[in-house]
Amino acid sequence: MFDTYASYIFSLFAVIIVIFQFALALGVPWGEMAMGGKYPGKFPPRMRIAALVQIVILVFFATIVLTRSGLILENYYNFSELAIWFVVAFSTLGAIMNTITPSKKERMLWAPVAIVMFLCVTYVALN
């Protein structure tokens, strides 16, 4: 049962990040809270495209987590048993990078989110 909650929490945070990335792609000046704060203000065009790519990846990851918990796409459960470990690896990297980023705003905002997502996906993967 807790893996269901963990999947929902992971997915909720993924949706929040998708909204944030979409805002960056549209030109909202939140660049100091992403990518180590390297692009304060509005993202340049290539970084806006990168934000869109991150959206696709996050949606895919949330789909894998929800599938692994048995909540959606039952026919892809076997695929999710292996794919979940890629999400765990990515979440591990995300938690580390958001914890050590030079951008204080990014660290304060996204490190806790990344750590919770890492804990949730790891729990789902192990159960």
Image (cartoon, rainbow, N blue to C red):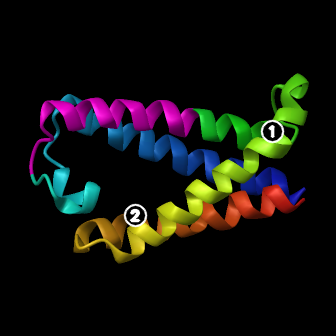
Instruction: Give the label on residue 110, or none.
Output: 2
The span picked out in magenta is 41-59
Q: Residue 25 location in percent, x, y?
A: 25, 32
Question: What element does badge 1 sit on?
Answer: helix
Q: Quadrant of residue 78?
A: top right
Mark 2 packing: few (<14 Cα in 10 Å), some, or many (20+)? Answer: many
Residue positioned 17% across, 39% down in the render: 28
> CA–CA distance between discs 1 and 2?
26 Å
Q: Residue 27 location in percent, x, y?
A: 16, 34
Closer to us: 79 or 12? 79
Residue positioned 74% across, 63% down in the render: 122
Q: Residue 49 location in percent, x, y?
A: 28, 29
Q: Residues at badges 1 and 2 in contact (C-beta under 8 Å)?
A: no
Identified by mark 2, the residue type is Trp
Q: Is residue 72 magenta?
A: no
Identified by mark 1, the residue type is Ser
Q: Which residue is mark 1?
A: 80
